[in-house]
Every structure is written in C-alpha cells, then in structure tokens.
Image (cartoon, helix red, strand yellow):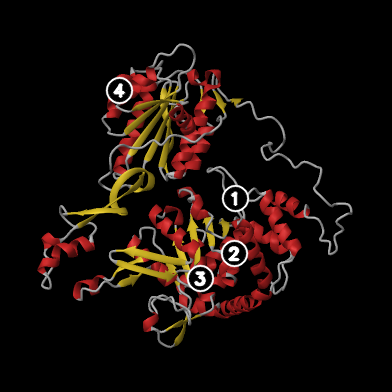
Amino acid sequence: MYPFSAVVGLDDLRLALIVNAVSSAVGGVLVRGEKGTAKSTVVRALAALLPPVETLEGCRFSCAPGDTDCPDVASHGSVVERVARLVELPVGASEDRLVGSLDLERALTTGVSAYEPGLLAAAHRGVLYVDEVNLLHDHLVDLLLDAAALGTSYVEREGVSVRHAARFLLVGTMNPEEGELRPQLLDRFGLTVEVAATRDPQLRAEVVRRRLAYEAAPVEFAASWAAADAALAADIAAARDLLPKVVLPDRALQEITTVCAAFDVDGLRADLVTAKAALALAAWAGRDEVTTEDVRTASRLALPHRRRRTPFEAPGLDEDQLQEALDSVPPSDPEPDDDGPGSGTSSEAAPSPEAGVDGGAPSSGSAPAPGAGVRTQQPGETFRTVQLTVPGVNKRGGAAGRRSLAEGGTGKLTGSRLPVGKVRSLHLMATLRAAAPNQPFRVRSQDLREAVREGREGNLVLFVVDASGSMAARQRMAAVKGAVLSLLTDAYQRRDKVALVSFRGSSADLVLPPTSSVDAAATRLTDLPTGGRTPLAAGLLRAAEVLRVEAVRDPARRALVVIVTDGRHTSGASPEVAAAHLARSGAACVVVDCESGPVRLGLATLLGQQLGGRSLTLSELSADALTSVVKAA
C-alpha cells in the first residue's frame, strides 16, 4: 500500500482525514475531484495510521469489550487487539452484501436460520470507503443513511432479525463530472475537500518520481517511509488522548455559530460538525483550547457542501465572507454590563437575504450575440415541475435512478416467480418453501424461485429545444430556458442522464451529448443563442438519431424526449414524417407548448398527438400550478 506520508501535496485532504482519525465524531470526509488525483490512494493509506482496536475473540462485529448488545455475546472469548479495518463498498454491491443475509450453507445443511454479517458489520470501529459514491444505488444510500444516523444496523429479512452496532468513519470519493450526490447523503459527510492536480511542474515531477519508485519496488519504497508513517500515527494517538481535555471557549463557539448563520446553512448539523472539527484541530496542534484559526480551518472543511446553492453550483466557500463573519464577532467581555452600551439588540437592520450581491436590479435577461438576428437570453425563474415518467415497467432493469419503474436485481422485493431460463436473482425463502416436501434429500430445479424486485430507474432525458426567432420574440425564450432549467433540476434529483438538441436556422445541433453531468447541460442551456427560422423536422430527426446511437451504447436505459416548441415550422421539410420516425423509436415523448398570445394555432398539441405522447403548456409544467388547479376543483 502506498504510504500516507509519501503523498505529495493534497494538504486539505490529508488534514481532513487526520481530523477524522483524531475524532471519529466529526463524521467522515467526502473527496470531490477530477480523475487521476490520487483520491483513492490517500484514503486507502489512512488505515495504516489508525490506532489498533480492542475487541473480543470470536466476535464477528468487532465489538468493544463489555458490549453486551452484541449478537455474538454468547461466543465471546478473550480480549484481542487488531488493526482498524478499511472496508470498501463497491458501487455495484447488493443489499445482502451491505447489511448481511441468511447464512445459506447453514440453512440448507441444518435447516437453521442464521445471520451472515455484511460490510456494515465489518466496518464497525473502522473506515467504510465508497469509491464513486455519487453512483451508488439509491436503496444502498438509504441503508447507509440509516446506519450513519443511528450508529446501528437493523436487519429484518428472510426470517432473520438482527441488530448490531455500525459506527464507522465514512469516506467517499467522487468525480463531479459523473453527477452530483443526493443532498441527504451529502449532509452526512462531516467534511468535504476539493482536490485537483497541481499545475506546478516541479511538484508534478515529484509525484511521478515517487510513483515510479513505488511501482518498481513497493516493499522497499514503503519501508523507506515507514518511520514517517509511524511518527504520524503516534501524533494521531497523542491527539486522541488530548482531545477530551480540549476546551471550546464561548467566543470560539460564537464564531462558529456566526459563520454558519452567515452562510445560511440548513439545520444545526453544520454548527456541531464545525465545533467537533475545531476541537480535533486544536488537539492535533497540541493545544488545549480552540482558537479562531481552528474555527477558520474547520469552517473551510465543514461548510462548503452545506451552504445553500443551486443544484448546478459547485460547493465552495467565499474566503472574504468567512473573514467578515469572523470579524463581526465582538470581543469577549468577562464581566458584561447589562445596563451599559451594547446591551439589547442592534438598531441596524441586517441585509436582506433576498437582496442581490451588488444590491442592484436583476439583469435585463438578454445580451447581444454575434450574427444578425441572433441573441442570447438568460433563463427566467425556475420552479418545481410535475413528474414526467416513461410509461410501463422496464423488464430489463435500467440504470439506478428515481424516475421510472423498473424490474431488476435491485430495488424492493415484491414477490417470486418461476424463472425463465437462468435464475438471475434467487428468492431463497420461496425456493426453500417449494423444496420443503422433498427434504431432507435435495432441491430440484423446478423448486427454484426467482426474486421479483421493483425499484426506480434513471432515464435518458433528451431535451429538444426550439431556439428560433419566433421563440425569442417577446422574451419568451427566457421563460423557456427557465422551464428547461427547472426540468434539468428535476433530472438531477432523479439521477438521469441528459442530452440537449437545439434547432434553429436550417439545422439542428447536438449541443450536449448524453451525459450524467447535469450542470454541463445547464451551462450550455444558459449560453444557447436564439434567432432565425424554425427547422422543426430537423430537430425531430436529430433527436431520433441521438436515441438510436445511445440505444446501442446503453440498451437498458429508456429515453424520455421533452420537446420544447410552439409547433411552428418555417424551414425544411414538413414535420409529419419526422414525427412518425421519432415515434417509431419507442421513446416516451412530452411536448411543452410554448405558444403565447391571443391567437393560438395548437400546432404543439398536434405534434404531441403525432408522437403518441402528452402535451403540456408552460403553466401546466409547474407542479405548484397543477396542485392549485386540483385544489380548486
């Protein structure tokens, strides 16, 4: 394993991991960064620095001596010492692998229902590492959330009922280009760190030099850094011993709460995590009291992923705003005078949170762009959209997500059935019940039962946007961009892939190929120019071609085509043939009717009928507007 001390740079990441090694109460680390930045290397090297743990011989759950709630308490032996474990959770892991399941061997040979622990049990009092955590399936995320919140794993399945401790340091790595993380899981990580490759040629050369030396002679290279790692481990152990003696003074606590309020974070978890990280930083520095510098460093690590932001805005912290918040805390007064100056509340009003950054009016929403008749309009206000789904259930099992129904190897267990061909997912209890009359001799092939699981899948949401001159008239494109941005937010929350086709002038362009990076689609949409004639047929044909190519790459992912247009066509062929061609692709289609004004031709509605899909107006796209209509009725 590559030594922790041999890592070049990545100071924030190393510090965040050390803080968690000093105090497990901080809550883990989320590492965000581009590929090839040694994220996984640093995390895996952390385990060698953790102090060993005391447990009991024969305990499968790594419980501490004296833990009477352990399921293995009856078989506990003498106290033994072992290294802290680093347990890796693969992205494609099953629910059984994570929480544990019925011991199949004992069930079939002795007929006894016994529990086989999973990864949560193995990670207790150690590190649970999830690479590409943003790609983890939703139902596994839910299980992780429960265990991280309670420190306990509850298993109720297949005739087994078990509860065991599951307190671990949660470390996740992710590449933001492959999609963001669910807010519920994001908040469970105590600290977050952004990593990027250094642009300093000398540092890059040193990274390459050390890596080549390690690959050439890994044992010798690790031995050459063993002393540095041992010293670091000793410092971590000393900081752990000092931690209970570290004091959080009132001024430092006020600095923490002031900073958290200034960045408008949700809830109080940010305050608690920042306080715990500041205490650990003070212990790591060998101090017995938290200082302002500890608060500053803890805030930089604990708040970027918790401050309020749009789904397409990267986490980050404004250093100037952080300094202003720290400076706004008044000096501590050991003997405050209640009747003197400064008592009571301030008469100065705080700036309104709704005010703009510069206090000025919002931009006009449009800016000239090169080319006659072509301009770029900024998106209008966004809103919560109605749920658009692909009809039916995907029998092939689609990609993990939250939009449409799918059957597959993951999701909620809904029943069992006789398999057709090879058994894909064995339903153990149903199989044993079917085989019971033949016991104790054998399980026949006709006794096998396949599990039927139904969950949610992510779709490919292909946006086909009319960017012609008719759409740009009367600032309509600003409202259209706001609506599509709202749909992109919905796609981000449902873990879809997205693509963007724009048509104007005489052709249609694939502005953004299918990708999981929804923020890239938002950026392309914001900069999308408008103007020119309306080649509706070209847009439909381009959409059909995108679907054809993507079906070859990802055949299990179903497509939802969202066409944003007023239905007019003033350039190229008539759209009827192109609409029929797109309908034959089998993709679910939704037409968002952007027609406005007193005279309506209903062309977008007609297009929806030709595509065999549904049509919605811009106002009907808003879930709030739809809710108010239902309530009025």
Who's the residue at 17% across and 56% down the image? 422
Question: To which residue does mark 1 refer?
Answer: 266
Who's the residue at 46% across and 86% down the image? 79
Measure how far apart labels 2 and 1 are at the Cα level. 22 Å
Label 2 sits on a secondary structure element that is: helix
| Kind of residue sitting beneath label 3 | Ala
Task: Mark 2 vs mark 3: give the one in front.
Answer: 2
Q: Residues within 10 Å of mark 1 (few under 14, many from 20)?
A: some
Label 4 sits on a secondary structure element that is: helix
Q: Residues within 10 Å of mark 2 (few under 14, many from 20)?
A: many
Label 3 sits on a secondary structure element that is: helix
Q: Which mark is residue 628?
A: none
As drawn, is 324 to the left or to the right of 410? right
Q: Are marks 2 and 4 in contact (CB under 8 Å)?
A: no
Q: Residues within 10 Å of mark 3 (few under 14, many from 20)?
A: some
| Kind of residue sitting beneath label 2 | Ala
Near-viewer residue (546 or 101): 101
Task: Mark 3 vs mark 4: give the one in front.
Answer: 4
As drawn, is 538 to the left or to the right of 124? left
Task: Mark 2 vs mark 1: give the one in front.
Answer: 1
| Kind of residue sitting beneath label 4 | Gln
Of callouts 2 and 1, which one flags the residue occurring earlier in the amino acid sequence? 2
Measure how far apart labels 4 and 1 are at the Cα level. 46 Å
Question: To which residue does mark 4 refer?
Answer: 610
As drawn, is 257 to the left or to the right of 23? right
Question: To which residue does mark 3 refer?
Answer: 45
Who's the residue at 28% across and 42% down the image? 393
Q: Residue furthest bottom?
A: 78
Measure how far apart labels 2 and 3 are at the Cα level. 14 Å
